[in-house]
Image (tube, rainbow, N blue to C red):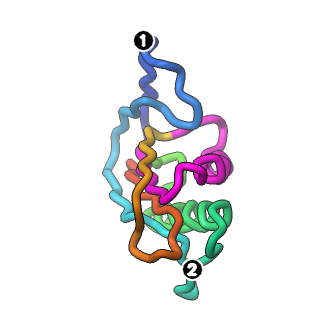
Amino acid sequence: MAFQVINPSVLPTPTGYNHAIRASGTPLFISGQVSIGADGRTVGKGDPAAQAAQVFANLKSVVEAAGGSMNDVVKLTTYAVDLAYRPAIAEARAKVFAGGYYPASTFVVVSGLASPDFLLEIEAVAML
């Protein structure tokens, strides 16, 4: 995938994301992923780090099934039920985006998700 990172000098230097990504290719819109394992059960009930790891594993599985890699992801939207989960989510994100590449990103705190067991949900856009 060909892409260009856009971080204007008049904006603060981002950490863990980029302000914008210009990409070419075919977009892959990935539904919000939650911490459900292959067995259909919630992984990491009450544990934001375990849930974040599972969510990123699920995102990676979807991107790879479409023929891409996590480096093809150009946009993330993260929904969390508590701002305190942000460090755990950032740590899991850093493990899947190698080499300092990060997509454009939005972090939203919400009052709840589809199940009270879900602490976070992440949707993505990849360009393949």
Residue 10 occupies which quadrant of the picture?
A: top left
Label 1 Cα crowd, 10 Å radius (few <14 / some 14-19 / many 20+): few
Q: Give the magenta range.
A: 75-102
Sequence-wise first label, 1 or 2:
1
Residue 21: x %, y % from top left: 40, 34
Residue 74 appears anywhere in the view: no
Residue 27 appears anywhere in the view: yes
Q: Is residue 49 left or right of residue 18?
A: right
Residue 64: x %, y % from top left: 51, 63
Q: Amino acid at mark 2?
A: Thr
Q: Which residue is mark 2?
A: 42
SS under mark 1: loop
Give the farthest residue toward the top: 10
Q: Is residue 101 left or right of residue 9?
A: right
What residue is drawn where x is 44% and y is 38%?
104
Q: Is residue 72 left or right of residue 38?
A: left
SS under mark 2: loop
How many dots with numbers? 2
Q: Which residue is mark 1?
A: 10
What residue is drawn where x is 43% and y is 34%?
3
What residue is drawn where x is 36% and y is 33%?
22
Residue 52: x %, y % from top left: 60, 61
Residue closer to the observer: 51 or 28: 51
Q: Amino acid at mark 1?
A: Val
Residue closer to the observer: 100 or 49: 49
**Relative to 50, is 11 above or below?**
above
Label 2 Cα crowd, 10 Å radius (few <14 / some 14-19 / many 20+): some
**Relative to 36, is 82 above or below?**
above
Residue 61: x %, y % from top left: 53, 67
Whole-angstrom CA distance, mark 1 to mark 2, is 42 Å
Q: Quadrant of the N terminus?
A: top left
Determine the main secondary structure of the stretch shown in magenta: helix
